[in-house]
Image: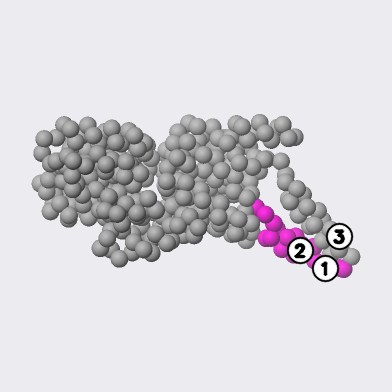
Amino acid sequence: MRNKSAEYRRQTGAETPVDVTRREWLAAAGVSSMLGLVGLLGCQPTKIVEEAQKGRRLRAAFSNAGLAGTWNKLGYDAAKLWGDLLNVEVVWFDGEFNGQRQREKIELAAAEDWDFCAFQAHQIDILAEPCRRLKARGIPIIGMDTLIVPENQLFETGVLIYVTPDHVKMAEQSTQYMVDKIGGKGKVIHIGGQSEHSGAQDRARGFQNIISKYPEIEVVGGGVRWCDWQTEKARNTFEVLLEQTQDRIAGAFFHNDDMALACVPCLKGTRHEGMVVTGVDGQRPGLLGVRDGLLAATSVNPAAMIHMYALVLGQFIVRNQEKFDRLLKIVLPCPLVSKESGNLDAMLYLSDPKHCLV
């Protein structure tokens, strides 16, 4: 059994063994002993079983797009923190920013026993089939941040709850801040995430919603440049756009703070120095970037809150035996943070990995 568990960990990237832990065995033995005592005392065994089930340690499969990203790592930290607090073992499957690799891992996970699962798909439809298999086995699924399948198909695919920010709004408010700061005219750059990522698609839509109102703004290169969340690719793309533009570029909007912060150093000593740069994520690196003047503003994509909600709601579903007849969509707040917004210190505190609250 030990060799089989080691092979499973090697194939899936799971952090904990598949076989039952000593703690779980002891818990099961304890329940059996309790039931024997209940029989002797003439109590109702069904009620005792329900109480024991509510207190037992749960096991949940989690996956997001890739732990190499700051946002995703904070989500991991949040799930682990709240799992420890609520007696849920979180087994993690790293998406590695590769849709096919994520699917392979979740396909293997779908054959295992879980109390519930929570997934942020690297790209839409990539996890559809393993989710349907989990649904067929009665395992609840919670969608996080991105769409596993189109929204009108989530429930039939097995997703009971979809916890998400408003990606369009995040982009709109960050873009609007940039536009206001540059006076509604000039050249701007639009650096996107991954083109098949539903959140990135919505951020591109939000950017365009604002830019379309300003005829004196020109997007350098003609539109969004997809950089797949990769900081090196974003920096190389950004440098090319800077070099091929003779006029000063006034602003830039990035789909996440990691890419934005990687590109800001390229501006030093160039005619583009002083560019108004805004992003999305609003986690600690981006917030510090706003504090230190590297970023003009960022929109909060509440990584910790999304993963924490998924964990908390999942254990409620299992422990309360909750049923759903349609999808429950929960849209979380995503405030803009700038030096003028007055919420920078609060967001720094809430996003701290010791708290994992936003």
| Whether residue 327 can be seen here | no
Q: Residue at x 62, y 53 (%)?
A: 88
Task: Please report whichever mark, 3 or 2, sits nearer to the chain's N-terminal start.
Answer: 3
Find residue 5 and report its horizontal and vertical position in percent.
Answer: 69, 35
| Whether residue 9 can be seen here | yes
Task: Please report whichever mark, 3 or 1, sits nearer to the chain's N-terminal start.
Answer: 3
Task: Please report whichever mark, 2 or 1, sits nearer to the chain's N-terminal start.
Answer: 1
Q: Residues within 10 Å of mark 1 (few under 14, many from 20)?
A: few
User: Decide: marks 3, 1 in contact (CB < 8 A)?
Assistant: no
Find residue 240 and report its horizontal and vertical position in percent.
Answer: 22, 32
Q: Residue at x 15, y 52 (%)?
A: 182
Q: Residue at x 50, y 32 (%)?
A: 101
Looking at the picture, tell me which residue is in the foreground, 31 or 124: 31
User: Decide: marks 3, 2 in contact (CB < 8 A)?
Assistant: no
Looking at the picture, tell me which residue is in the foreground, 71 or 60: 71
Please give the residue where the numbered disc 2 appears in the rendered image. 48
Of the two numbered discs 3 and 1 in the rendering, the one whose residue sits closer to the viewer: 3
Q: Residue at x 31, y 45 (%)?
A: 261
Amino acid at the residue labelled 1: Cys
Is the residue 99 above or below the residue 120 in the image?
above
Horizontal side, residue 200 vs residue 329: left or right: left
Residue 329: name its quadrant: bottom left
| C-alpha separation, residue under disc 3 versus residue under disc 2 | 11 Å
Q: Secondary structure at mark 1?
A: loop
Please give the residue where the numbered disc 1 appears in the rendered image. 43
Q: Which residues are magenta?
A: 41-58
Q: Secondary structure at mark 2?
A: helix
Amino acid at the residue labelled 3: Gly
Is the residue 104 above or below the residue 187 in the image?
above
User: Decide: marks 2, 1 in contact (CB < 8 A)?
Assistant: yes
Please give the residue where the numbered disc 3 appears in the rendered image. 36
